[in-house]
Image (cartoon, grey):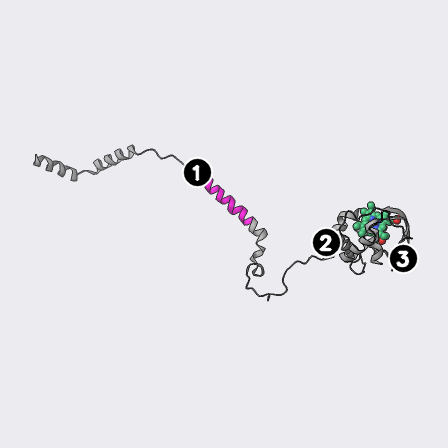
Amino acid sequence: MSSDHNHTYVEQSGASDESIQQVHAHAQAKKPEQPHGYAKFPLVLLGIMCTAIFFGSIYLAHYSAHFDPMIYNEHQKPSKGPAQVATITPAMLGKRVFNNTCIACHQASGQGVPGVYPPLAGSEWASGSEERIIRIVLHGLNGPVNVAGKDFNNAMAPLGAVLKDDQVANVLTYVRAEWGNNAPAVSAETVARIRAETATRTQAWTATELQPYAK
Ligand code: HEC
């Protein structure tokens, strides 16, 4: 019995290359087949990550402000010349109001339309008394008027209901500083005061009526 067992043991230890290969081949044949190619799920995940990185880069390129230490580092001293902070002036805001509300008639050039809409560029009305032009914008202007040596006889609609005090102030500040005009800015407080003073008015002004406010 024991000699038989030993015999088998010896035979096993002396297994030939061929028999080892056979055993391996047998074992491998039993393994479940690996699917070919890549698994779908990790590919989707990879796709999502690439998309996130792609759009993330675009976002950073737009909004990182080049990681400016003036913005991101609270300890940074403003030593690298003037800070690049954009200041928005009343005239800049006024230009927006002008482009929305006045440009159709008075034109981007401020030249108006000959015989129809008077110019604001070089106009003694635009650069003159603020008492007068604030009234014009709030309640309109009607009938004959002489602007920069030319006669007009038309009507400008009242804009007091559409424009707030600061919008009137800003647009007039813009008009008085643009196209070579050089008159002082108009404040929202002045507009508010004149709006209160003329609160009961319903008609547009005439040039004659505005004479007392010419100075
Ligand atoms: C619908 C056309 C129209 C719009 C919009 C308009 N205006 Fe006028 N504006 C006129 C006309 C027309 C006159 C002259 C009225 C007349 O003949 O009595 C005038 C006159 C004026 C005058 C006095 C005369 C001059 O040319 O200097 C000023 C100042 C003025 N407008 C400013 C403005 C401002 C500021 C806005 C925008 C907030 C504006 N207007 C919007 C048509 C318009």
Compared to residue 13, the image places residue 79 above or below, namely: below
- N-terminal of the pair, mark 3 or mark 1, is 1
Q: Amino acid at mark 2?
A: Leu
Residue tagged by mark 1?
Answer: 41
Main SS of the magenta part reads helix
Q: Residue furthest bottom?
A: 79
Q: From mark 1 to mark 2, how far is it between C-alphas? A: 53 Å
Q: Secondary structure at mark 3?
A: helix
Q: Is residue 40 magenta?
A: no
Q: Amino acid at mark 1?
A: Phe
Residue tagged by mark 2?
Answer: 93
Q: Residue at x 55, y 59 (%)?
A: 72
Residue tagged by mark 3?
Answer: 212
Q: Is label 1 in contact with label 2 (beta carbons under 8 Å)?
A: no
Residues 58 and 144: in front is 144
Q: From mark 2 to mark 3, how far is it between C-alphas? A: 30 Å
Q: Position of residue 185 (x, y in %)?
A: 78, 59
Residues 116 and 127: in front is 127
Q: Is mark 3 within 8 Å of ligand 1?
A: no
Point out the frontmost of discs 2 and 3: 3
Determine whether, in the image, residue 4 is placed left or right of residue 26. Answer: left
Q: Quadrant of the C terminus?
A: bottom right
**How would you rate the neighbour count of disc 3 (Cα within 10 Å): few for under 14, some for 14-19, many for 20 or more?**
few
Q: Is residue 49 magenta?
A: yes
Point out the frontmost of discs 3 and 1: 3
Determine whether, in the image, residue 93 is placed left or right of residue 42. Answer: right
Q: Residue at x 75, y 47 (%)?
A: 100
Q: Secondary structure at mark 1?
A: helix
Q: Is residue 67 visible?
A: yes
Residue interval drawn in magenta: 41-58
Residue 180 picture quarter: bottom right
